[in-house]
Amino acid sequence: MQPESTVPSKALVCVVDANPKFRADVVTALTSFYEVVEHSEQGAALEWIAFHPPAAVILDENVVPRGGLPLLREIFCVPELDRVPIICTATNDRSMFLADAIGLGARTTLVKPFRRSALLQALSKEINGKVERSWVRIEPVQRAALQRTTQAFNAVADLIVDGKPLPYQILSDACGPLVQSVQAGRYKDMLNAVKDHDNYTYVHSLRVSIFLSVFGYSIGIRDRDLVTIASGGLIHDAGKMSVPYHILNKTDRLTDEEMQVMRDHVTQTATFLRSSRDLPQGALLIAEQHHEKLDGSGYPRGLKGTQLNELSRMATIIDIFSALTDRRVYKEAMEPAQALHLMTQLKGQLDQSLLKMFKTVLLDTAHSMI
């Protein structure tokens, strides 16, 4: 089994602005979620960016000595740096800097003062856009799986906001290429392709979908049933789309109230999914019971023992494994072997026979791809 690469938990963002108060405010706003470096001067900023290409740059019009536009041109003229996402800022929405920046190829602009939420949303969108554009380099079926699951995930978010039910066709169409990749034993590139993606709920859900499909396929689940469990994995945390960003990615220990908000995502997911008339029962079961434990210590219903069928037990194992090996802003990704060893200590909570089977599946598939 291949170990996860050791990468920083937080993506690196460079803030270039001559206003020290603005830089300090941005650093305060972003530090919980990103590693932030600040510069005020054009030459020093370009040199630093060239040697330490960040995940994104926040560039203001007032950079000294000549303004932000010359620096933007210099960045776009350096090979590879022209791919670094740049968010351009100004104090006026009629700023020529913003208009010229868009003309040069900048995709996102913000007018000061702006909300922290707007900055976080813009950063995440830009970082994810760069990651998703890189998918052109992987095989067509796996690329289709990533593109379709991303589109489906975004569609689900819109449906939740609009209060509309989820058509199962959206999920089954998205998970078709994913299942094809799993059946061919070619899912590793998909896992690698989302390591730097900034939507952690999507990444976790995709990983659960992939690992659940791998596990299901290994024990004989096929065709529509395999698409069903892949769909259940992709949608199992839909309720987290309603959890506030600062709680979902909090680096400190959650308060009791915040923990309850997090746990409520299961109930919210179930409520949303039960409005779908054609969602297979297996997909709903995965969403409703992936936090239940054999000893009854799970939530939201405290189910235990024979109340949990094999699919529920598989979903719990996969969700925990993926959570431990996910990269998050508050932790490094745990190596798979370490995660599996830790899970063997949860004898009363997890089905150890299924866990042993899953471990064997991971070892076999990893070996086959070496």
Image (cartoon, rainbow, N blue to C red):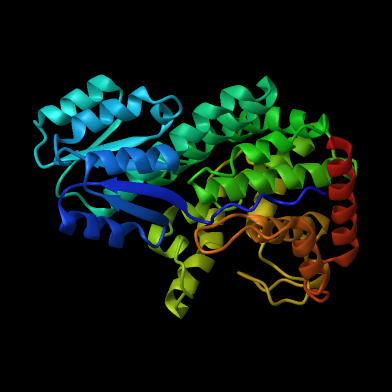
Is 313 situated left or right of 90 in this image?
right
In the figure, is residue 338 to the left or right of 29? right
Q: Please state the horizontal and vertical placement of residue 183, each as a whole percent of the image.
A: 82, 32
Which residue is located at x 54 percent, y 28 percent? 134
**Residue at (69%, 61%) from the top-left corner?**
320
Res 324 quadrant in image: bottom right
Is 97 located above or below residue 359 in the figure? above
Residue 194 visible to an observer of this rendering: yes
Quarter of the image holding residue 33?
Answer: bottom left
Q: Nearer the viewer, residue 240 or 27?
A: 27
Q: Tell me residue 342's x, y (percent).
A: 77, 69
Near-viewer residue (4 or 44): 44
Residue 105 image position (x, y, % from top left): 30, 23
**In this picture, is 221 found above or below 115?**
above
Query: In the rendering, at what x and y percent does residue 115 appear?
Result: 22, 52
| Residue at the image position 38 percent from the left and 48 percent from the top | 13
Residue 297 as seen in the image, left or right of residue 365: left
Q: Quadrant of the C terminus?
A: top right
